[in-house]
Image (cartoon, rainbow, N blue to C red):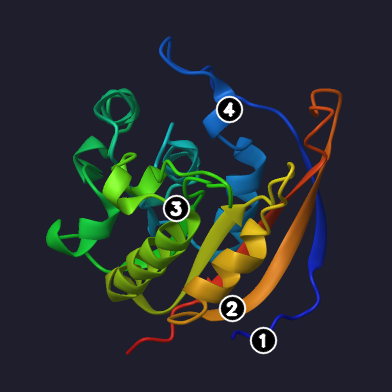
Amino acid sequence: MPRLSFPLHLNLPYALERDPPAFEDNAIKYPEALARHFIKAYTKRGDRVFDPFAGLGTTLFVAEELGRVPFGIEYDAHRHEWVAGQLDHWTNMVCGDAGAMEKFGFPKMDFCMASPPFMRVTDKWNPLYAGNPKQAGYDRYLKRMGVIYARLANVMKRGAVVVVHADNLPGATYTPLVRDLSFVIGKTMRLESETIVQWTGRAVPQDYAHTHCLVFRNVKP
């Protein structure tokens, strides 16, 4: 079990700067300010920034805006096409399974920030297997997440920082997703801190006052 340090606290504006594509809404993206904060904190111009769960590309767009070189993976073909079509480094964007990242020929990365698909304890549909009923259940989800981040360690430079954005999920059965991800990913990477981000501004949703980011360091040779 990884050792947790006291969480850090941070205030950031809640503002979604880029309009979503017509086939999506903004439910799957975090504010650009979140990516901007961590990319500035842990990288310099020219560094390679990786997101294996690219979604609507927030990490990649901000990385390119800041003079970093974005690389990413997105399983959904529509999202992949939409994101790649707006990147200067569009050839660095792969449509595929994050679990196969070692097969895509990526160079070693300097930094990673991602918001992996969330899953509740009570859910059967496993987003990491596109809902395959043979892979249903939260336990299989966590096991697969551990495998994906173990493979990510082979794509990252030694000493590189990996930021994982996650939320605990309320409901009839509470899902401590932040804690659970810290455990499974912490088996192959060193958990250095947890940052609790308090959103500020008029656009903050009533049911989303804060979020969490786990900061790991790749210690694999």
Q: Dot 2 corresponds to which residue?
A: 191
Distance, label 4 to label 3, CA atoms, is: 23 Å
Is 43 located above or below residue 115 in the figure?
A: below
Q: Dot 1 corresponds to which residue?
A: 3
Location of residue 107 in the rendering, given as x and y in whole percent from the top left corner = 22, 64
Location of residue 57 in the rendering, given as x and y in whole percent from the top left corner = 43, 36
Distance, label 2 to label 4, CA atoms, is: 27 Å
Q: Secondary structure at mark 3?
A: loop
Pointers 3 and 1 in contact (C-beta within 8 Å): no
Q: Dot 3 corresponds to which residue?
A: 137
Q: Residue at x 71, y 49 (%)?
A: 173
Q: Dot 4 corresponds to which residue?
A: 27
Is 95 located above or below residue 115 in the figure?
A: above
* Left-right relation of 98 to 120: left
Q: Secondary structure at mark 1?
A: loop
Quadrant in the rendering for residue 104: bottom left
Q: Earlier in the sequence, mark 4 or mark 1?
A: 1
Q: Quadrant of the C terminus?
A: bottom left
Q: Residue at x 41, y 69 (%)?
A: 146
